[in-house]
Image (spheres, rainbow, N blue to C red):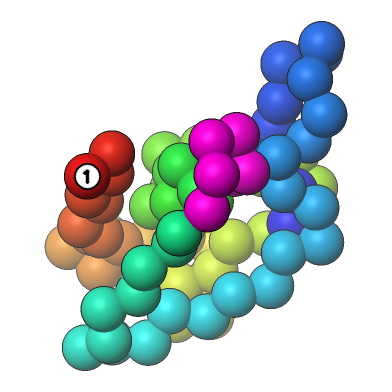
Amino acid sequence: MAGPAPAHQTWPLREVNVAFRPGVITGLPGRNGTGKSTLLSLAAGLRRPVTGKVTLNGGPVWDQPAPRAALTLLSRC
């Protein structure tokens, strides 16, 4: 998948493949502007990718019932 970016910026995400496992706490460390928040927004179904897809249990994340698609997002700690 690839995430959206303003026209004057480069894409923060390109060719990303990631799997989050149930019961596992996952951290995304990195410098400002590297796509951490974009990745989480895409994974939560808050944004749609420009290319590619985001799936949860085999289907598009935005087609999942709310409790199944729920993710806890904690940022800027």
Q: Position of residue 54 (x, y in %)?
A: 59, 61
Work out whether 30 lies above or below 3: below
Does any portion of residue 48 appear in the rendered image? Answer: no
Is 44 one of the magenta-colored residues?
A: no
Q: Which quarter of the rendered picture does the C terminus lie within?
A: top left
Res 7 quadrant in image: top right
Count of all numbered marks drawn on residues in the image: 1
- Identity of the residue drawn at 27% across and 86% down: 24
Work out whether 21 lies above or below 75: below
| Residue situated in front as seen by the camera: 45 or 76 | 76
* Image side of residue 7 versus residue 66, left or right: right
* Image side of residue 42 versus residue 68, left or right: right
* Image side of residue 11 versus residue 22, left or right: right
- Identity of the residue drawn at 45% across and 59% down: 29
Q: What range is drawn magenta here?
A: 30-35
Does any portion of residue 72 appear in the rendered image? Answer: yes
Q: Which quarter of the rendered picture does the N terminus lie within?
A: bottom right
Res 67 quadrant in image: bottom left
Q: Position of residue 13 (x, y in %)?
A: 72, 48
Looking at the rendered structure, the kind of residue marked 1 is: Cys
In this view, the residue farthest toward the front is: 31
Work out whether 55 lies above or below 30: below
Residue picked out by circle 1: 77
Which SS class for mark 1?
loop
- Identity of the residue drawn at 35% across and 74% down: 26
Q: Position of residue 27 (x, y in %)?
A: 36, 68
| Residue situated in front as seen by the camera: 24 or 68 | 24
